[in-house]
Image (cartoon, rainbow, N blue to C red):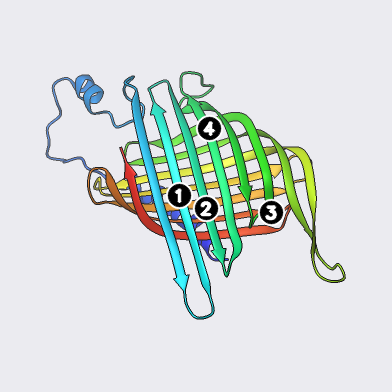
Amino acid sequence: MRFPGFFCLLIVILPFFVVGQSSKDPGTPPPKDTSVLKKATSDSLHHTDTTRYHFAYTGTGTINNNNSLRSYVLNNALKLSMAKKSATVDFSNSWVYGKQNAVKTNDDYSSSLAFNLYKLRVLEHSYFWGMANYNTSIPLLINHQMQAGVGIGYNVLDKKTATVILSDGALYETNDLYDSLYGVPGGNIFRRDRYQTVRNSFRLLVHFVWLDKITFDGTGYLQNAFRDWQDNIFRLNGSISIKLYKWLNLNSSAAYSKFTRTRGTNTLISFGLMVQH
């Protein structure tokens, strides 16, 4: 699979590209009161205590209808956010539904509630986070999966136009899976696999904005079970959006997921429009 390597390359090189850019005019004289200017033009993501709300909806789809094949995939995503200087709260939902020749290939739902606390910190540029997830996926053979946990994050780069964040923590997870057994006479069979575990959850997040028109977002997750390091969940997500109007973007996204417990993988590439406010 070439997608994970492509995303990893983008996530690694983009922060260095952003850091190397500068909008400062070397011929501009310094202001008389630099502290006032710094307070007014600070480009930190958390520079004011004003509560900001954000809404984004993305809808994409693919339909293929010919003599021997009929298939379609619909991808919907909704995100609601509230941000202050001291904390942020994000509520994200996505639903992917697809069929191929009347056989259901996707009915995947994911919902996530996450919060970040910036006043409580052990290091400068660090913060505490907490999250709760619910997932179901046909390609990953997940009937029901719930996760909840807390951890610590660190802002490697924290600008309005460039963000790089590393985070790590522990998640309690409960699963109801369909486990495929291979090598059985007559073909594969499926059984229900119900279990609980605690995972280490590591995340790399990159956000980059160019000329206030083009936005790149990339996220990578690696979640290993503490009692069995080979039991892991790996996810890569990347998206590029081009602003058409103040509230309308042209959006392209790609996602790759792998769950070693069920030996399930899923790759999804989509194009569409995103409405945000």
Residue at numbered disc 4: 113
What secondary structure is found at the residue carrying circle 4?
strand
In the rendered image, which residue does mark 1 sit on? 76
Relative to the observer, which residue lies in front, 94 or 13? Answer: 94
N-terminal of the pair, mark 2 or mark 4, is 2
Mark 4 and mark 3 in contact? Answer it, CB < 8 Å: no
Q: What residue type is labelled 4?
A: Leu
Q: Mark 3 or mark 1, which has the lower sequence index?
A: 1
Instruction: Answer whether labels 2 and 1 touch (C-beta < 8 Å).
Output: yes
Residue 88 sits in quarter: top left
Point out the image quarter for the N terminus.
bottom right
Distance CA(mark 3)–CA(mark 2): 14 Å
According to the image, label 3 marks what residue?
Answer: 141
Cα distance, mark 2 to mark 1? 6 Å
In this view, the residue in front, 201 or 155, is 201
Who's the residue at 53% across and 48% down the image?
Answer: 220
The CA distance from mark 3 to mark 1 is 20 Å
Residue for badge 2:
96
Q: CB under 8 Å between callouts 3 and 1?
A: no
Answer few, some or many: residues within 10 Å of disc 1's Cα (few below 14, many 20 plus, some between 14 and 19): some
Earlier in the chain: of badge 2 and badge 1, it is 1
Figure check: 119 above or below 143: above
